[in-house]
Image (tube, rainbow, N blue to C red):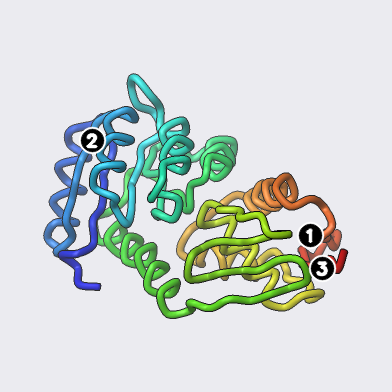
Amino acid sequence: MEKHEIKILLVDDEPDILEIVGYNLKNEGYTIYTANNGIKAIEKAAKHKPHLILLDIMMPEMDGIEACEKIRNTEGLENTVIAFLTARGEDYSQVAGFDAGADDYITKPVKPKILVSKVKSLLRRIKKDDESSDTTTLGNIVIDREAYLIVKDGEKIVLPRKEFELFSLLASKPDKVFKREVILDRVWGNEVVVGGRTIDVHIRKLREKFGDDNFKTVKGVGYKFVINEN
């Protein structure tokens, strides 16, 4: 995919942020759209179907957490990469953001070169998805990586990107215990610093959707996927 074909939606209520970040990303050749609150973000996301959304949390009218949740429930935007771009670095904000369906978390202020590097890293995930398109059947579960879809007992389940990547990683080697640091590196990447509760939040979300049978906790180590033959 050529850079000019990649669409990025930048959402922030600070005009300076929109101008500076937008300028640097446009210089990289990306197509940039902007919005200054959560309501406009949802409207523009639905209209333009961006590949990546950089979304502030603290905004008027509708904050980034609520906007992220609504975007995730919008048809055609389930797999859009969403990264919060915010000055709030508290652990609870990160957990709330991931719980809402965000993929990553970038703390302001961030130097333009570092931001561009992080954006490139986020967009590489789209490329990896395109290259690893296949289908895997594990017991009563079918994982369709091309469609970013999981089918359990004939029922289709669409997951936010990070939940799908975590599910796919654990299911790639059933009964293998994946250490927490390995999960963070493989799913979130070593460029992004996330809180220790991030994995727990995503595992909890998966258990809510699939039940406890497929996901086992190994205390002090990590998690593993178990095939349920029932």
* 81 up-or-down from 46: above or below: below
Residue type, mark 2 in image: Ala
Contact, mark 3 vs mark 1 (Cβ under 8 Å): yes
Secondary structure of the residue carrying tag 3 is loop
Q: Observer-nearest residue: 55 or 164? A: 164
Mark 3 closeness class: few <14, some 14–19, many ≥20 residues within 10 Å: some
Q: Residue at x 48, y 40 (%)?
A: 89
Q: Is residue 169 left or right of residue 104?
A: right
Residue type, mark 1 in image: Phe
Q: Observer-nearest residue: 30 or 146? A: 146
Q: Nearer the viewer, mark 2 or mark 3?
A: 3
Q: Looking at the image, tell me whether mark 1 or mark 2 is earlier in sequence order.
A: 2
Q: How far apart are marks 2 and 3 (CA)?
A: 43 Å
Q: Which mark is residue 16?
A: none
Secondary structure of the residue carrying tag 2 is strand
Look at mark 1 in the image and give the residue it sits on: 215
Contact, mark 1 vs mark 2 (Cβ under 8 Å): no
Residue 58 in the image, given as x and y percentages of width and height: 39, 28
Residue 120 in the image, given as x and y percentages of width and height: 32, 66
Q: Residue at x 61, y 53 (%)?
A: 157
Look at mark 2 in the image and give the residue it sits on: 35
For the N terminus, the image quarter is bottom left
Q: Distance between the residues labelled 1 and 2?
A: 39 Å
Look at mark 3 in the image and give the residue it sits on: 226
For the C terminus, the image quarter is bottom right
Residue 57 in the image, given as x and y percentages of width and height: 41, 33
* 49 up-or-down from 19: above or below: below
Q: Observer-nearest residue: 42 or 146? A: 146
Contact, mark 2 vs mark 3 (Cβ under 8 Å): no
Residue type, mark 3 in image: Val
